[in-house]
Amino acid sequence: MRCVYCLEDKSAEAFAGREHVMPQAFGRFTPTNLVLRCVCDACNGAFGRGIDEKLARDSAEAIDRVLQGVKPASEYKGLGARSTSHVEFVDGNLAGGRGYAIANPDGGTVPGVTPFAQVWFAKSSDGPWDVFLLEDVPTMKALVERGYDPRHKLYIRTFEIEDPFLTLESKGYNFTESEQEAIEPLCGRVPIEHVTTVAEPEFRAVTKIALNYLAYTTGPSVALEPAFDQARTFARYGPTNGRVRVYPRVNPWFVGRRGHYVSLTRAEDMIVAQLSIHMRIQYLVVLAEGDPSVTLHSAAHLFDLDTREVKEIEPLPLTPGFALRPVKR
Ligand SMILES: [Zn+2]
């Protein structure tokens, strides 16, 4: 049998596992999750340790997975230092600082947050505060160049730094006349904003789901067509081998719905999958272009999180929706 990702001919034993069209991290559905037998165990395993894990643990979808009750907040697990997502504190004594989502021991559907190791500087006790992650803390000299007057009082807050005095003294700060005050630890509810990068790993992850869906709805023989080589190599090996156009958008149809949507349609000379996990971001994945002579029927499925059913539905019109709000830097 031939694998639709690595294209290798392998014996039946190399296809022992099942590839889920929608990664199981995003819920189990009835009557069946859509599964494939045409993805070899090597590819299936590589996806699980790579792009599937990224999408499930470090993405807008990863947070929605908790907010929508698929993963208990007490079990939330991010990617730690490998994360490309973070949270920004928008109010309270951490306002302007950064942190990351962690498990919430109280459970529920809201993940916990904890600040990164960071240092805050201000010219007055009321701020405004300049915030630096530990690895970006400027030297005293560099801070003075930013307009701080070394003759005046300097207000400093540190978070999660084991030995703040030692750390800052190594950067030229002098604490001969310092006063210390403990700041209340972070606890209770704090207003935050999640900031997520939607980039190549996420695009690869959704391209794989789109190609999985094509293999599911049309059968492996269509998915093996050379027209989809760019999509399969991009999903499996990354952009050095394949290129796929993926557009993240917001779709008004999704507002207020809980679940996932995936569809496959022809549009002009392209074969396009429209996909959303948790209905926040809509991805348009151009699986093939140049009018490929492939037999294809439009199809769409809704993974309904309220009823935990997966059902075939009429494909939504292919609408570009709204562009996502640009990330502030
Ligand atoms: Zn394979």
Image (cartoon, grey):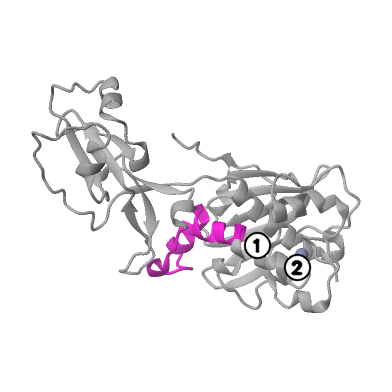
Q: Is residue 168 left or right of residue 15?
A: left
The mark tally for this picture is 2
- Vertical side of 209 occupied by 94: above or below: above
Circle 2 residue? 39
Name which quarter of the figure residue 125 lies in: top left
In the picture as drawn, the residue positioned furthest to the front comes out as 170
What secondary structure is found at the residue carrying circle 2?
loop
Q: Is residue 117 left or right of residue 268?
A: left
Name which quarter of the figure residue 178 lies in: top left
Q: Amino acid at mark 2?
A: Val
Range of the magenta residues? Answer: 50-78
Task: Estimate the x, y position of residue 53 in percent, counting from the top left.
Answer: 56, 61
* Disc 2 C-beta below 8 A from ligand 1: yes
Which corner quadrant holds the C terminus?
top left
- Vertical side of 194 occupied by 211: above or below: below
Q: Nearer the viewer, residue 225 or 268?
A: 225
Q: Circle 1: is it few (<14), some (14-19), or many (20+) Cα within 10 Å?
A: many
Indicate whether residue 97 is drawn in magenta: no
Task: Estimate the x, y position of residue 224 in percent, counting from the top left.
Answer: 85, 60
- Vertical side of 323 occupied by 207: above or below: below
Q: Quadrant of ligand 1?
A: bottom right
Q: Which mark is residue 47?
A: 1
Tell me if I can see residue 93 in this picture: no
Which corner quadrant holds the N terminus?
bottom right
Q: Nearer the viewer, residue 122 or 108?
A: 122
Q: Amino acid at mark 1?
A: Phe
Task: Estimate the x, y position of residue 136 in percent, counting from the top left.
Answer: 36, 37
Q: Main secondary structure of the magenta part?
A: helix
Tell whether label 1 touches label 2 (CB within 8 Å).
yes
User: Residue at 37% of width from left, 64% of height from top?
Assistant: 103
